[in-house]
Image (cartoon, rainbow, N blue to C red):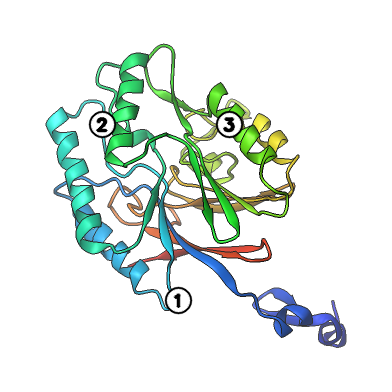
Amino acid sequence: MVRRSLLKKFGLMTGGLILSQDLLASPKTSSIRIAHITDTHIQPHIGAAKGFEKCLHHIQNSSKKIDFIINGGDAIMGSHSASENSIDKQWELYKNVLKSENNLKVYNCLGNHDIHNKKSDLRSFEDAKIEAQEHLFLPKPYYTFDAGNWKVLVLDSVQGKISGKGYHGKIDEQQFEWLKNELKNTDNSTPILIVSHIPILSACVFLDGKNFKNGEWRVPETWMHSDTEELVELFAKYPNVKLAISGHIHLSDRIMYNHVTYCCNGAVAGNWWRGSYKQTNPGYAVIDLYNDGTFENQYLAYS
């Protein structure tokens, strides 16, 4: 057991964490504070709009000011079997709640439920993605912006299949080239936050259903990126890639691989607006991006 005299000499233990005296002497100042909401799955009749309002109020009543919101995708419930009229009403409800209950800037990311593929072919999928971009005011499905001294890269992690049926989690070749160039052309002193809807790397995907079958763990390509290895290898070249956040699974986890921390930040909708999903409450993450390139990601229940 570590002796208290050593703790006193080199640091203080608080809540299971050892804090160095340097950190205590020089408390961090937050450059930017973000609310990461994801998987709101807005739809009529089940209290989704009221729940979303409650979440937005919780964010804006934070004791420490939130600078902006990142919407991690699946703003609406969607459904391939839903009518065009039903989808339009979902988008209208989502926008109305944001307009009436939110005063913060929102940066959007595409989710699979946002893409209403009416004909189940690849052309229809791409057209539906453009429609979703229009609803979310996105000129492009992937983009970058600055947040204090950090750079944020928002990815489009939902790609249609050649067969036209369903989707898979990955970025396409053109986007991969864009990502490589963005990382290459970013000063290595600038810390980077990656945003995706589908997790790039996650632990909770193994627990979303019975995924151990016939002696093997199996994770569908719709649950986690199928190009994880390529992305991890790319990030390994850039130590300033610090944090990657996602949603999609409705569960909360935090893992670290190499120098990158990956956080899957639950869901505003929880268990599809029926309370908690397994051990994860309906909620959102508060992310502090510090000037020195460190960060904190905390998942909060709003009710």
Q: Residue at x 38, y 22 (%)?
A: 166
Q: Amino acid at mark 1?
A: Lys
Measured in 3D between alpha carbons, the distance from the residue under mark 1 to the one under mark 3, in whole angstroms, is 35 Å
Q: Amino acid at mark 3?
A: Trp
**Horizontal and vertical percent position of residue 203:** 59, 45
Label 3: state its secondary structure.
helix
**Horizontal and vertical percent position of residue 110:** 39, 38
* Left or right of 224 on screen, residue 230: right
Q: Residue at x 74, y 40 (%)?
A: 236
Front-most of residues 213 and 121: 121
**Horizontal and vertical percent position of residue 84:** 16, 29
Label 1: state its secondary structure.
loop
Q: Amino acid at mark 2?
A: Ser
**Horizontal and vertical percent position of residue 109:** 41, 42
In the image, residue 272 above or below residue 67: above
Instruction: Indicate which label's residue lies in the foreground, 1 or 2.
Output: 1
Q: Quadrant of residue 31?
A: bottom right
Measured in 3D between alpha carbons, the distance from the residue under mark 2 to the one under mark 3, in whole angstroms, is 30 Å
Residue at the disc numbered 1: 64
Residue at the disc numbered 2: 79
Residue at the disc numbered 3: 178
Label 2: state its secondary structure.
loop
Earlier in the chain: of badge 1 and badge 2, it is 1
Measured in 3D between alpha carbons, the distance from the residue under mark 1 to the one under mark 2, in whole angstroms, is 37 Å
Q: Quadrant of residue 30?
A: bottom right
Q: Residue at x 24, y 21 (%)?
A: 118
